[in-house]
Structure formats: C-alpha cells, structure tokens
Amino acid sequence: MSKASPRPFTGYHMAAILIAFFGVIIVVNFTMARLAMKSFGGTVVDNSYVASQKFNTWLDEAEKEKALGWKARASRLPDNRLAITLEGVSAAEVTLTAHARHPLGLEQSQDFTFERAADGSYTSREKLAAGRWRVRLEVTAQGQRFRTEQDVR
C-alpha cells in the first residue's frame, strides 16, 4: 500500500479561504445594518441646529419646573388606560395632557385626555396599545406648567 502524498497548498486554496472569510464578514455587516435600520423608524429632532439654539431655554424651563416640586407617575391600568398620580399639585383647576410615542417609532403616536377619579388620580379616556411607550405628561395648574417623560409598559 502506498501512501497518498499530501496535496500542496496553492493560491486557489488561499483565495477560497479569503473569499469565504470576507464573504462571512460582509454578510454579517449587511444583516446588522439592515436590522438596525428596520428597528429605528424616526429621528430624535427634526432640525438639530434649531434644537441647539433652544437648548439653554429648555434647561431654564426644566429648572423652573423642578423648583415647583411636583411629581407625576404614570401607570397602565388592567383595561389599558393610563392612570396618572400627581404629588405636590393642588387639585384646583389641573389640566393634564399626555402624548405617548413608541420608543423606536414603529407604532403611531397617541394623545390622551384625562378625567379626575374619586381617589384624586387621573384616568385617560383613551386606551394605550400594548407594548412599551414613552409618555410625555404636561400638567398645568395655578398658572404654572410641569412636564415630565416616563416609560410605561
């Protein structure tokens, strides 16, 4: 019995290895880029220059709102309506609005209006779709305005 001599490593072998290696890298990169583009559906701000010009004003407004000492907590009720609990706000003439947006922009945003419940909390008239949502609350009372954002699942 004769042993078969090993085949020599040629340029064709090296070319096949390089093509397979870089082919896998390219396929993975394109797949990851496609998934990233599909999962983020919107923009953070429409015009970054205008947002940069308003930034200091937004910081000043946030400091004034923080000084009020008001707090708001949003939660989902079993029937998918929003419940808002306010702290530090007198109950007289409170106006409460909310805007819910999907964190990735995949679902359509929704506005909410509220009715005051017997326990002092506020309950939305509209239902919130299933999933995770970023809810922006705006409370107006005593000539003051307070805004906050929180996640609701």
Image (cartoon, helix red, strand yellow):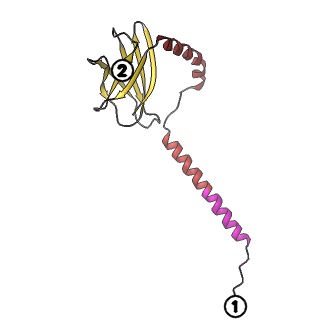
Residue 96 is left or right of residue 48, and the answer is left
Residue at the location (53% across, 14% down)?
63
- Tell me if residue 3 is in the magenta stretch: yes
Q: What secondary structure is found at the residue carrying circle 1? A: loop
Tell me the residue that label 1 is attached to.
2
Residue at horizontal 67%, vertical 65%?
17
Above-or-below relation of 111 to 36: above
Quarter of the image where the N terminus is located:
bottom right
* Residue at screen point 42% across, 6% down: 143
| Pointer 1 local density, CA inside 10 Å: few below 14, some 14–19, many at least 20 | few
The C terminus - image quarter: top left
- What amino acid is labelled 2 in the image? Thr
Residue 139 occupies quadrant: top left
The residue singled out by tag 2 in the image is 85
Q: Is residue 23 above or below residue 135?
A: below
In the image, is 62 to the left or to the right of 143? right
Task: Tell me the kind of residue under disc 1.
Answer: Ser
Of the residues under marks 1 and 2, which one precedes in the sequence? 1
- Viewer-nearest residue: 60 or 85: 85
The location of residue 80, given as percent across then percent down, is 31, 32
> Farthest top residue?
142
**In the rendered structure, which segment of residues is drawn in magenta?**
1-24
Residue at 29% x, 32% y is 78
User: For this view, does 40 lie left or right of residue 135?
Assistant: right
Q: Picture coordinates of residue 59 (x, y %)?
A: 56, 16
Give residue 129's mark: none
Q: Residues within 10 Å of mark 2 (few under 14, many from 20)?
A: some
Question: Which secondary structure, mark 2?
Answer: strand
Q: Quadrant of residue 24?
A: bottom right
Residue 147 magenta-highlighted: no
Distance from the alpha carbon under mark 1 to that under mark 2: 87 Å
